[in-house]
Amino acid sequence: MTLQTTTDTLPAPSRFSVRTVLQNAGIGRALLALIIFFSVFTEHFLTPNNITNILTQITINLVLAVGMTFVILIGGIDLSVGSVMAFAAVVAGKAITLPGFGPAEAIALAVIAATLTGVLCGLINGAISAYWALPSFIITLGMLNIARGAALQVSDAQTIYSFPYAFEEFGSAMIYGVPVVFLVALVLVFMAWFVLNFTVFGRLLYGIGNNEEAVRLAGQSVRRYKIAAFTICGFTAGIAAVVYMARLNISSPIAGIGFELNAIAAVIIGGTSLSGGRGSVIGTLLGAFIIGVLANGLILIGLSDFMRQMITGVVIIFAVILDHYRAKYAAT
Amino acid sequence: MVAATQTAAQAPAHSTQFLSVERLKKYFGGVKALDGVSFFLEQGEVHALVGENGAGKSTLIKILSGVFPYDHGAISLDGQTYRPQSPHEAKERGVQVVHQEFNLLDHLSIAENISIEKLPRNRFGLLDRPELNSRARKALDAIGLTDIDVKAPVSTLGIAHRQLVEIARALQSESQILILDEPTATLTERETKRLFELVARIKADGVTVVFVSHHLDEVFEICDRVTVFRNGRTIATDLIAETTPDGIVQRMVGRQLAGEMVSGDEQKDFGGVALSVQNLRTEANPTDTGVSFDLRYGEIVGIAGLVGAGRTEILRGIFGIDPVRSGEVQRDGETARFSGPGDAIAAGIGFVTEDRKDEGLILDMPISANISLANINSVSQAGLLKFAAERRQATEAGEKLKLKYGRTADPASSLSGGNQQKVVLAKWLARDPKVLLLDEPTRGVDVGAKAEIYAILKDLARSGVALLVVSSEMPELMTLADRILVLAEHQIQGTLQRADFSEENILKLAYGQTELAGGNSQ
């Protein structure tokens, strides 16, 4: 007998049905379509200057979304990344403006301070939600408030500025028109891609997202991996804080409000399932691009920022519908 | 109605056909799920559908219940064309299905679940609770569940009672045809008996029952006719009175079964004690003494008992999944304290769990990834996966266990039930376990794959592995085990040696008795 067919597989779609279109509408193709559309209908979209703009604009969201991908892959969510980013930026701002350090030491200190702050917040999120098996939605909602409050407390609600010139230079540096900060984000994407696809850790994260109990009964410490995913998400929030400071040369305690939602949107548009277990960081990269290209192109086309926001919302909903069909027909 | 059952016993005339299916075909893409299915049902008969997994029974049921449309052929019900577009339409026409997987809402009450399709309203348009509860009471009383509170949430019920509630729900609407899809898979003997009494009563009311089962004994116990499926086709329909279990099995598999199902009484020498359980009590065990037994290398010990007797709890306690309240587990004579499955695995123990979809497999992930899950360190180095090694491991395991699959990269969900179970086995065998715990190792597995799994387990024992097998199927335990521990109410009621093996003896002990036919308990 040949391969058994399970009887609960669903019918394969006929060639030109709505289903086929939905299934095959890859996120890359959608992005390409958007780029072509805006190139045709606006004058300035495909100019070097504008491309640089887009890359700069999506960098912070991309960095946050890379970490968010880990958390969503295990079926969690992290609502705190925007606040954690602000908290990390304020702590780093305090560090970088400490008297008695040269520019190089000051910058190193700031980077360490920002990432440590992010890692610590992520660790707390992960440890609490994993140890007591509580929904991460609530825990990170708490952390959202804690980190925002901490940012305001530490900074005394004041914006911190006057950073070393070298830091500012790093924030606006370009290589062939590509912002260096964007390259940093790309390196993160690559690292995440490698970890998720080629390591035991990545494999088990997918496993946990799909069937936590099976992974636990196979003798793996599910808790430890969950905590690690949240810690990575906190780490990227710390990196995002560094990028934010370098770009704007300030540390504001009210930075990053709502950033968590954009990061989640990028992950979901990128095809990662909100229930975990399915998705990729490459999708997240494309998702961040779609949000960025939409934002930029719609403004160029002459739509108001309000309209842009509405359309982004429509895209998110559409992405989830798409995901629904992908999941449903994945078996065939 | 009496007339209807009588005609069923005779060679049926064409006019009594109540539902007829002719040359039904159903394709999923290029795959032929049904490739010519023809049979008919008569009013008031109990009709069995049997066949290996993937033979087409489930697809047929889904078509009859309006989940899928069909591609070719014809179905007529009561003389009219039957082509349900939705489960709702199927129900309107009187076709009810009790699925293998339950469709109950855990947090709602039993009464709410029973009326969920048509909740009663009072004259203000609000939910009419008294009516709701009295309807449920009536529905449960009708199937003999008089001792259950209809206001209790479904989550408080055991798996067997859930099944009965599902049947109560299906029956309270006007049913002409009731389809039971492997209804006894999760039931103990006693509960099965109750179900069969119920089926007899339904049949007497003129309802046609379609019965899907992997247990031929059951088919012979309650069915009037049986239709055999193979590879998406109906092979034959027989009157039960005119056929034998062997005849049906041969039709199902199209070949003679190997002698694996019967086993000789050879004398075996076992090794030292691999696992010793002493007064083990998990949280679920209300007794003072707990359970104690030894398991030797090369020995297969079976654990029998009714659902709720504490069989699975013993395995979970040994494996470190559930906290142990008192007592201890010794591995090779040394006290073991497992704080989790990881420790148990490190001590050379494997656990093939009961529920492969929830606990055993990661369905969406590749076959190779499922096989490497418990010993991922052997296919990785410094945290990096070695894909070639992983593939090789899967291919080798596949060959050894006669796994039928496409590619090792295909998701586990692409396999049939029997092959999925082999993947779960392969996962643990890849670790070379010294002690293997198995909970219902062949549930939902077809006859052919069952025999293959038995052969694998016996080979393991021969090579020195100690096996502890929990099963609700008595023939399975009698085939596999060297010794059977029978549990009743969380205690070992008795131990049967091979010479004393009989379903009667197991049942007696399981029901709390100690007097055995032809032998004594120990």
Image (cartoon, grey):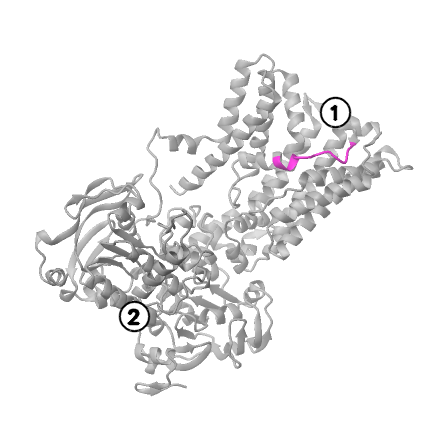
Q: Which residue is mark 1?
A: A172
Q: Which residues are magenta?
A: A251-261
Q: Residue at x 68, y 38 (%)?
A: A82
Q: Is residue A283 magenta?
A: no
Q: Residue at x 53, y 32 (%)?
A: A316
Q: Is residue A260 magenta?
A: yes
**What x and y, as percent, mark residue B71?**
24, 39
Question: In the image, is residue B343 above or below residue B410?
Answer: below
Front-lying residue, A247 or A178: A247
Both marks 1 and 2 on one chain: no
Does residue A222 show up? yes
**Label 2 amino acid?**
Lys
Numbered circle sitting on residue A224: none
**What x and y, as percent, mark residue B465?**
46, 70
The residues bearing labels 1 and 2 have C-alpha atoms spaced at a distance of 78 Å
Does residue B399 show up? no
Instruction: Name the image quarter holding the C terminus of chain B.
Output: bottom left
Front-lying residue, B389 or A227: A227
Q: Secondary structure at mark 2?
A: helix
Q: Which residue is mark 2?
A: B193
Contact between marks 1 and 2 (CB within 8 A): the answer is: no
**What x and y, as percent, mark residue B353?**
45, 62
In terms of secondary structure, what is the magenta stretch mainly?
loop
Q: Residue at x 81, y 41 (%)?
A: A154
Q: Residue at x 80, y 42 (%)?
A: A153
**Label 1 amino acid?**
Ser
